Amino acid sequence: MHNYLVYKAKYNAGIKIFRRFIRVNSIISLMLVLMLLLVTGCGSTAGEVGTASDMLEKEDHIVVGFSIDSYLIERWQRDTDIFAAKLKELDSTAEINLQNANGDIDTQIQQIKYLIEKKVDVLVIVCIDSDSLSEVVTEAKSAGIPVIAYDRLIKNADVDLYISFDNEKVGTLMGEALLKAGLPNKKVMMLSGPNEDNNVSLVESGFNKVMASNDIEIVDTFHAPGWKAEEAATYLSEHITELNSVDAIMCGNDNIATNAIRTLSEARLAGKINIVGQDADLEACQRVVEGTQVMTVYKPVEKLAQAAAEYALALAKGEDLGVSTTMSDGSYDIPYYFLDPIAVTSENMDETVIASGFHLKEEVYMNVSN
């Protein structure tokens, strides 16, 4: 009898626990159902079923798609970092979807298509090939996505804005610096960037005008594919005998200049041939103050990237850019915003590159004895 009572008490206690469990979980289940009804009811039209993930995707914030050529050139990391920082400063909810094509045009096209599919609010593109993106840019614009060509022109694409530096002036500054340094034999070689980059032709145009007006002969020109500096160095090494009477080498950027100077050093010609470049890379600035590179062209990329972020947000919001200057892309006159480049020598290094915070003074002068 005692065992029976014990058993019955345990049984009743178990029933109470079970009933309490059912009651509590019914309340939880009811709450879950109500939450689901609220989620599926918001923003859905008749016959549509929304989900929590759909709601997250529809949050009201701006997404900027940024397609970059590659990080082969030192400055591009700086550009994208400054752009992203400025974007967040202007709009803390804005996002950037950054795609790096690693120098491959087919990859860049596919990545831009991906950004179109993701329905970004605006596209910013540093193109690899100025002639190969018009079709995919048309796709973006047809999808209602405005496009900014950043630093490099995209031809025949009718982009909403082209933002860059005065690239013809870059070439002019290079030519003038070499004239000032002296060209006794009136002969110059060019190690330039790829023809696919529209800026290359603009830089060469400015440089060639200075050379032509001063009767300077350009004895040879090489276009490094994909801005691969090592290929420019290989070409220079293979044509080293042609340098006997050459006064100077115009290098398409400072990375090419770095490799050219190494090749000249191996041939014991360093210091005998004047070198100019552009981008104000740290190594180049060090060489300028050391006296092994005549000049570099400083392009204040922080101002360009910040301006691009401002224009990207404006386009995403459908606002007027207020840009009155235009440039032909071959088929269309497009809005063109540009900044002036600055020739940097040992004489003005402190008040240009260093004063702007582009490089630290101790880094630039690290190899120069006091």
Image (cartoon, rainbow, N blue to C red):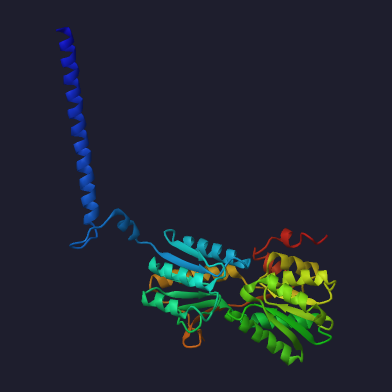
Residue 237 seen anywhere in this rendered image of the structure: yes
Looking at this view, name the residue that lies furthest to the left.
1
Side (left or right) of 141 relative to 274: left
Q: Is residue 233 above or below residue 3?
A: below
User: Would you identify the image quadrant in which residue 271 lies?
Assistant: bottom right
Q: Is residue 93 above or below residue 322?
A: above
Residue 58, percent across and down? Answer: 32, 61
Quadrant of the image containing the C terminus? bottom right
- The foreground one among 217 and 225 is 225
> Residue, x 47% and y 88% (percent of image)?
331
- The foreground one among 231 and 179 is 231
Residue 49, percent across and down? Answer: 23, 58
Looking at this view, name the residue that lies furthest to the top.
1
Side (left or right) of 339 relative to 235: left
> Residue, x 81% and y 80% (percent of image)?
243
User: Would you identify the image quadrant in which residue 214 lies?
Assistant: bottom right
Quadrant of the image containing the N terminus? top left
> Residue, x 76% and y 84% (percent of image)?
188
Residue 207, percent across and down? Answer: 69, 84
In this rendering, the count of numbered labels is: 0
Residue 287, percent across and down? Answer: 76, 68
> Residue, x 65% and y 64% (percent of image)?
358
Q: Is residue 21 above or below residue 368?
A: above
Residue 166 seen anywhere in this rendered image of the structure: no
